Amino acid sequence: MTDSKTLDTFRTYLENNPLPSRHRAGASDRTIKGYVQDISIFLRWWKQSFGAELTVTFLRKDPYQLNKKVLQDFLAWLETTLHHTAATVLRYAASLRAFSTFLVSAKAISHDPTIGLRLPVKKKADPKGLDDAQRARFEAVFQNPWLDKVTKRKRTYETLAPQRLARDKAIAFLMLYAGPRVEEAYSLNLDDIEIYPRSGVMHIRKGKNAKERDVALPKPARDGLIAWLKVRKEFPIHHNALFVDLRGKYDRLSMRSMQSMIAEAGQRAGLDRLDPPIFVTPHILRHTWLT
């Protein structure tokens, strides 16, 4: 069995068996392609290092040639010679675990050479929110409707510009000052919002890990919601979704629409032209609230 035959057999194995970290059989095409590519590089490194091809037949004669020390040397080569990041090295380690599982199933080895590998620690970047100046720029774009195009005949989105502005500002300020995740904002209904003269509460019915929670609504978030709820009454909406698409059937506004609107607001505020650039997302607005 040649290297190419080994890779083909490994690919077939991935298509029909669960990965070491999963119980469900059949990885995605992208995952399979990545694992096979990683192992092809490992096999090439093996041949250059030991002068022989690493195949199932080769290992059956002496399975312990594939051991922790060899794999550790390969991972070190990725770091020191190819200068791969910790995240990339960890991906190769996952590929090696899958490859070892495949070799066990092929009865080429009976041990797991990946046990005890020393792996690099992936640095997790702290999500950053907007600072005061950036937040002020972001908020300012909601002072006037977004009418950049001038046409002889007003289009639907231009006719509804003030109403859309009220809705979009309510969404943006809710994320900015109360911090719901985009899927939580999407799921909000009218009875999930309680507004009083000097306070307010947002009820998250199904948050992360299916947990319920109540979140206080600061004044900027309340003001945006009050303005939007007044506008919402102008439309023939026959369901209780809080945020709706103002075109067509007034369906619940999609998460993608919310994400696109937040991104466009960031661009209009010029935050993507800063150094370094900031590409605003609902996640960034949530972290602005958290910090």
Image (tube, rainbow, N blue to C red):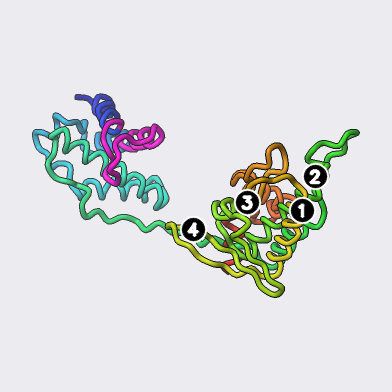
Q: Does the magenta stretch include residue 22?
A: yes
Tell whether label 4 touches label 2 (CB within 8 Å). no
What's the distance in space between the residues labelled 1 and 2, CA to CA?
11 Å
Residue 12, image x and y in percent?
Answer: 28, 28
Q: Name the residue under label 3.
A: 240
Depth check: give the residue in front, 22 or 1.
Answer: 22
- Quarter-of-image position of residue 251: top right
**In x, y percent, where is residue 79?**
37, 50
Tell me the distance, in whole angstroms, between the alpha carbons under discs 3 and 4.
19 Å
Q: Name the residue under label 2.
A: 160
Q: How crowded is mark 4: few (under 14 residues within 10 Å), some or many (20 or more)?
A: some
Q: Assess whether mark 3 and mark 1 are in contact (beta carbons under 8 angstroms).
A: no
Q: What stretch is highlighted in magenta?
A: 15-39
Instruction: Specify the quadrant that holds the N terminus.
Output: top left
Image coordinates for residue 124, horizontal then vertical, percent? 45, 59
User: Mark 4 belongs to which amino acid?
Assistant: Gly
Report whether 17 appears left or right of 160: left
Query: Which-is-in-front pick, marks 4 and 1?
Result: 1
SS assignment at label 3? loop
Is 283 within the magenta?
no
Please report whichever mark, 1 or 3, sits nearer to the chain's N-terminal start: 1
Q: Label 2 amino acid?
A: Leu
Q: Separation of disc 2 and disc 4 at Cα?
A: 32 Å
Q: What's the mark number on residue 207?
A: 4
Q: Which mark, by number, is residue 231?
A: 1
Q: In this view, does 83 lie to the left or right of 99?
A: right
**Residue positioned 62% across, 51% down in the render:** 240
- Disc 4/disc 1 C-alpha distance (Å): 27 Å
